[in-house]
Image (tube, rainbow, N blue to C red):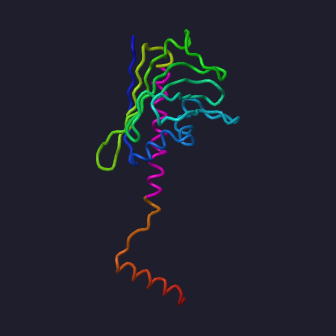
């Protein structure tokens, strides 16, 4: 039976921040750690390939030579991207046919950034495939964990930017600050 999985997270961050957090190799390995936890050997979830062009081959790997092989099926920067899974990677070798691939082949993995309210955006993740199996059940358990980390990455930086901005002062508060500084100097 075909499967569909949908999840979303509301983010207080810019579209640019959301997009770069999704696809920058440095942040990708952080938010996707629930799929392939980092190891002391430098392994962990990784993305290899240029996601910015339809038809490009992309490898979603565990850093040890295993993972998924996909093609960029649709792409609009800062809006959406859809990957079409075409095979698996085992021992750094592509497997595009056979029982290891059949249950997953032609599955779609889509990411959409939609306007929510005010300064917020919603990241929608959707996966569809030919049949429900152990892998799809696993993904349904893991995606919520990855999205919590993703939200933290996006919003942590945005919050930091807000607190790093100099605060505007009224003329009266500037005078009070000068007075306070003068009093401290006299002591």
Report which quarter residue 46 is drawn in.
Answer: top right
Q: Is residue 163 above or below residue 30?
A: below
Residue at 46% x, 57% y: name it. Answer: 161
Instruction: Locate residue 15 relative to residue 87 in the image: left or right.
Output: left
Residue 138 percent location from the top left of the image: 50, 22
Residue 33 percent location from the top left of the image: 56, 34
Magenta range is 137-161
Q: Is residue 89 above or below residue 13?
A: above
Residue at 50% x, 16% y: name it. Answer: 134
Instruction: Locate residue 55 relative to residue 33 in the image: left or right.
Output: left
Give the quadrant of the N terminus: top left
Closer-to-camera residue (14/81): 81
Q: Is residue 53 above or below residue 4?
A: below
Residue 22 percent location from the top left of the image: 48, 39
Residue 141 part of the magenta segment = yes
Q: Main secondary structure of the magenta part?
A: helix
Residue 145 part of the magenta segment = yes
Give the quadrant of the C terminus: bottom right
Residue at 29% x, 45% y: name it. Answer: 117
């Amino acid at each position: 039976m075909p499967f569909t999985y949908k999840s979303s997270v509301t983010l207080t961050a810019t579209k640019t921040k959301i997009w770069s957090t999704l696809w920058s190799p440095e942040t990708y390995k952080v938010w996707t750690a629930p799929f392939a936890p980092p190891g002391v050997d430098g392994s962990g979830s990784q993305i290899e390939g240029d996601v910015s062009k339809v038809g490009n081959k992309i490898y979603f790997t565990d850093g040890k030579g295993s993972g998924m092989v996909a093609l960029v099926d649709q792409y609009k920067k800062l809006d959406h991207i859809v990957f079409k899974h075409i095979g698996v990677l085992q021992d750094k070798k592509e497997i595009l046919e056979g029982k290891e691939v059949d249950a997953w082949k032609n599955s779609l993995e889509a990411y959409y950034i939609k306007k929510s309210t005010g300064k917020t955006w919603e990241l929608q993740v959707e996966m569809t495939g030919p049949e429900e199996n152990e892998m799809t059940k696993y993904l349904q358990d893991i995606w919520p964990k990855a999205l919590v980390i993703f939200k933290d990455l996006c919003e942590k930086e945005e919050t930091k930017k807000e607190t790093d901005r100099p605060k505007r002062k009224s003329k009266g508060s500037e005078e009070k600050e000068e007075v306070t500084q003068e009093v401290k100097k006299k002591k």
